Amino acid sequence: MTGTGTTGPIRPIRPAHHTRPAVVVVGSGPTGLLLAGDLATAGVPVTLLEKRPEKISNLSRAFALHARSLEQLDARGLADELEEAGQRLERLRLFSRLTLDLSALPSRFNHLLVIPQYEVETSLRRRAEEAGVDFRFETEVTGLEQDADGVTVRVRTAAGEGELRAAYVVGTDGMRSVVREAVGLPFPGHSVIRSVVLADVRLAEQPETLLTVNTAGDVFAFIAPFGDGYYRVIGWDRRRDVPDHEPLELAEVEEITRLALGRDFGMHDPRWMSRFHSDERQAPHYRVGRVFLAGDAAHVHTPAGGQGMNTGLQDAANLSWKLAQVLAGRAGDELLDTYEAERHPVGKAVLRSSGGIVRLAMAKRPWTLALRAGLTALLGAAAPARRRALGQITGVGYRYAAPKGAHRLTGARVPDLALADGGRLYEALRGGRFVLVAPGSYEPGAGREDRLTAARWASDRRTTLLVRPDGYVAWAAEDATPAATEAALTAHVG
């Protein structure tokens, strides 16, 4: 497929290490950084292209890491340092009368971590740099062309125009993805909330809660700390619908905050203010030949529930190990099709849940108010419904489809199991390997040491689990024979 072209002579741009990348990742947000870091850790030559300057911006949009994302970051040795940098929130309020207790989550991370996106990017970028990712800042992708053997990416830099060649390209370049447009994918959907105001300010009065959020009639406001003395304020007045480019004064932010929260906390000294709109959109496909989409390039939705950055991180965790397996010759191309098969339904579910939260939070009509009251009562009284809601918002409740006849655990997320050597499963997952958790001892066969870690249950459980690098069950069996285990390893690990 041919993307947009460039005019003028094309001058090739050599990678910094004079090695052709196997994968080009476009966009250095959290999704692209995690993906590139995973690939480089697995020994895959990867180049990351970013049109912005090298400096990480502190103008974060995302402010929360949910349990499943923290588990993925734990599998990369980053969760503990981010836990120290952020602040834990054990209760999540969705509506004025509905509070969900996160301490009941079946995860080591039974809380929400309030942390600015730039802190997450800083940790992920350091990991990617240490793994050898070839970063190209101020490099704008202008189009791409793919054929049976690879993808040619056209770029523009201060030095001129050029191109890169790779086996695969992943677009993690946001809502206005050039990669998505280049492969001809539409981005159907619509704007849900328009003329949202955003300001980073200091406050004379500290809020009583870590996250402050409320709706009152036609207005909504949210306040979260950066940790450096500044706070992010997001507000929306349904009655004021103006273009994103309309000038914004602090007085408007103060007024919306007072109407929604009862006071403006003495906000002052804004360092950044803007308007934006929130869309619900999803690409119909996440894969077109050798080109993939992840994160906001594949799906965008409202900020409700704080699921945006988290869903993108989990996209990356799903795709990275599959690309590494295929590029190493240990799996066929069909493995890459499972990325879209597994992640597209999750993206669709996130659109539904985040959109539902916003619509119910801003309910005005009698029937929507009745629906919100009924849902609040159901979640407050019924533990199964509450667990399902928490599982969706935090990501720990999703599982992937399994082949017919597979063990009931196949496709399920695996919690952080205790292992016989005193370690934990997510420590064993570090390095991007599969982990075989078995009731007895098992030594990886020759040639598998670099991609398989063998572990034993700390308990007397008889189940054998083959855990994928992203923490989901690839295969499971009760009282498995050595031959069955070996066959499963050959099929999944190579």
Image (cartoon, grey):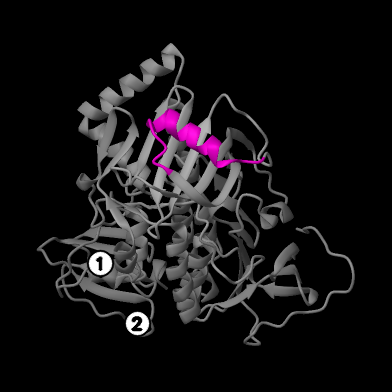
Q: Is residue 355 visible?
A: no
Numbered badge on residue 425: 1
Examine the image and state in which quarter residue 152 appears. bottom right
Q: Is residue 264 visible?
A: yes
- The numbered mark, 2 or 1, whose residue comes first in the sequence reads 1
Write the residue at 75% across / 58% down.
1
Which residue, as the protein is rendered here, is positioned at the far left? 460
Q: Which residues are magenta?
A: 247-266
| Three-letter amino acid code of the residue under disc 1 | Leu
| Three-letter amino acid code of the residue under disc 2 | Glu
Which residue, as the protein is rendered here, is positioned at the far bottom? 18
Numbered badge on residue 281: none
Write the residue at 63% across / 69% down.
53
Write the residue at 39% across / 34% down.
263
Tell me the residue that label 2 is attached to: 449
Q: How many numbered markers are drawn? A: 2
